[in-house]
């Protein structure tokens, strides 16, 4: 496995996969941060992040997953490389190595954006200390749906030679996930969608916000962590992994 | 010649279900945007305009630019694979025409998507209990959205022509959509190429086009951008070596 991982690293050395992932993460950070510089949001900053960032993640992380998985898997589709690999290593191992490598890149980006969120809070001068326990929950609840979406995209990217299929299905999924955030009335929608788990695992609510006073009298509160659906998500991850690995093993090359 | 090339492009896409994505994608904002409109009816008081915002806000900034990016990368994929550019560039056709044919192919898909988005909008409006759709305004959104979107398409074709990777141009298109949102927020949506589609479709501020000099000026900006990117595409193609 170590050899296969090294092999992945060598194959992607000049393909700028990590650079592309970092560029998308940087675009996300640039897009998020200028908004928090002033007013009541400085007072509410730490909690406001926990309320607002899942929406941003629901757009960016699935798209980053599509790009990374496609970049990693498309190498093998060119020149029938998968066929050559499959006669030297077991297919399951190839699936695992590529998945691990891609997941590592994704989780690195998640941790990076999480760290940048905290660093920016201090730089911007958010009031009070960072609620570290809540931020660790946020990290976990960002990483878990991202991993699930990545496993799904990874399977599609490996099983379909035509990468347009993986892109279109991923984008449509991300679109559905983003919309599910705006429809708290339709809880079933976010719970049944892989991309909706950024919303399911949100644990901070906004109260007393009004159009006239905006954040003046508003406050954020922890509304509870839905651990049952976190467990459901872990099961989904495991199921996606088993099904995806099996699909790849049975794929006609 | 251009028509023949266009026909060739259509032949390359035959039996490819890419159009399905453009058929499915607008249904999502139509269903859930309308649901959101119905839930928030007391806040969203501008009837058809409010419904339009619900339908197009995320579509124009994030998802349609990415879809166009994917489509453009897809129609360039065949040429980018297996040194097929050599075959294309040794055909007795102008290289600018090759670029234009691809631009037209993607523009047609964009136009059909726009018509589909507008049709779904009207149907959703009726289902949501609204009456008297503003037909002329909807037609204007459709036409100017297509025109603005063609600029995005031209850039994406140019990028996909020069970058062999399939995913990278799509990432750029995503970043472009984001930058478009930023420029719109800074009141520069009428001059930034990636903002023009959302601007032409009036996704979130129906008054802005009128303030910035109206539709004629918008059309001129789009045509100038299209001419510039087509010229760059033609020159890039002309300078490319057959190897």
Image (cartoon, coloured by chain):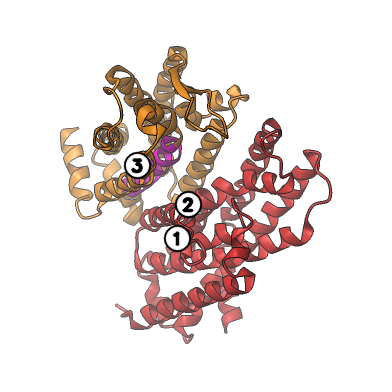
Chain colours: A orange, B red
| Residue that badge 1 annotates | B73
Q: Chain of mark 3?
A: A
Kindly tell me whether residue B38 is visible in this rendering: yes
Q: Residue at x 33, y 43 (%)?
A: A29
- Residue A33: which numbered mark, if any? 3
- Residue B217: which numbered mark, if any? none
Q: Which label sits in the foreground, 2 or 3?
A: 3
- Residue A164: which numbered mark, if any? 2
Q: Looking at the rendering, which quadrant does residue B147 occupy?
A: bottom right
Residue A167 drawn at (x, y percent): 46, 47
Residue B150 drawn at (x, y percent): 55, 67
Q: Which residues are magenta?
A: A56-73
Q: Is residue A219 above or below residue A247?
A: above
Q: Badge 2 local density, few (<14 within 10 Å), some, or many (20+)?
A: many
Q: Residue at x 35, y 68 (%)?
A: B162
Residue A68 lies in the magenta-colored region:
yes
SS type, badge 2: helix
Kindly tell me whether residue B109 is visible in this rendering: no
Query: Upstream in the sequence, badge 2 or badge 3?
Result: 3
> Which image quarter is the C terminus of chain B in?
bottom left
Side of B134 where B19 appears, left or right? left
Q: Is residue A172 above or below residue B64?
A: above
1 and 2 marks on the same chain: no
Residue B104 drawn at (x, y percent): 57, 71
Residue A122 drawn at (x, y percent): 24, 32
């Amino acid at each position: 496995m170590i050899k296969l991982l090294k092999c992945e690293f060598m194959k992607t050395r000049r393909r700028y996969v990590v650079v592309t992932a970092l560029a998308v993460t940087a675009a996300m950070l640039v897009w998020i941060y200028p908004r928090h510089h002033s007013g009541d949001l400085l007072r509410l900053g730490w909690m406001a992040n926990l309320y607002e960032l899942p929406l941003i993640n629901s757009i960016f992380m699935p798209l980053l997953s599509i790009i990374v998985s496609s970049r990693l898997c498309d190498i093998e589709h060119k020149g029938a490389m998968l066929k050559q690999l499959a006669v030297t290593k077991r297919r399951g191992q190839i699936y695992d190595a590529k998945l691990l490598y891609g997941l590592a890149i994704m989780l690195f980006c998640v941790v990076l954006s999480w760290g940048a969120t905290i660093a920016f809070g201090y730089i911007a001068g958010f009031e009070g200390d960072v609620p570290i326990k809540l931020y660790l929950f946020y990290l976990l609840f960002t990483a878990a749906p991202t991993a699930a979406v990545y496993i799904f995209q990874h399977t599609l990217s490996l099983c379909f030679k035509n990468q347009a299929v993986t892109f279109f299905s991923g984008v449509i999924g991300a679109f559905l996930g983003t919309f599910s955030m705006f429809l708290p009335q339709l809880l079933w929608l976010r719970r049944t969608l892989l991309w909706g788990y950024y919303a399911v695992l949100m644990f901070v609510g906004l109260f007393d916000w009004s159009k006239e006073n905006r954040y003046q009298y508003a406050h954020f509160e922890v509304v509870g962590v839905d651990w049952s659906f976190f467990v459901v998500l872990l099961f989904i991850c495991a199921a996606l992994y088993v099904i995806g690995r099996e699909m790849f093993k049975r794929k006609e090359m | 010649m251009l028509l023949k090339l266009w026909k060739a492009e259509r032949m390359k896409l035959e039996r490819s279900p890419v159009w399905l994505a453009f058929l499915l994608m607008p249904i999502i904002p139509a269903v859930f945007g309308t649901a959101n409109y119905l839930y928030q009816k007391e806040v969203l008081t501008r009837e058809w305009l409010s419904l339009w915002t619900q339908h197009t806000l995320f579509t124009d900034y994030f998802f349609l630019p990415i879809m166009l990016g994917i489509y453009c990368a897809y129609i360039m994929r065949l040429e980018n694979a297996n040194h097929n550019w050599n075959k294309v560039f040794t055909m007795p056709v102008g290289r600018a025409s090759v670029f234009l044919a691809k631009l037209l192919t993607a523009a047609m898909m964009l136009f059909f998507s726009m018509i589909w988005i507008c049709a779904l909008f009207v149907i959703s409006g009726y289902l949501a209990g609204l009456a008297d759709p503003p037909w002329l305004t909807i037609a204007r959104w459709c036409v100017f959205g297509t025109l603005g979107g063609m600029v995005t398409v031209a850039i994406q074709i140019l990028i996909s022509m020069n970058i062999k990777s399939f995913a990278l141009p799509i990432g750029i298109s995503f970043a472009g959509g984001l930058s478009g949102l930023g420029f719109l927020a800074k009141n520069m949506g009428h001059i930034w190429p990636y903002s023009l589609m959302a601007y032409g479709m009036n996704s979130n501020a129906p008054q802005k086009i009128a303030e910035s000099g109206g539709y004629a000026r918008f059309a001129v900006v789009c045509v100038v951008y299209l001419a510039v990117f087509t010229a760059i595409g033609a020159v890039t193609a002309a300078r490319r070596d057959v190897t």
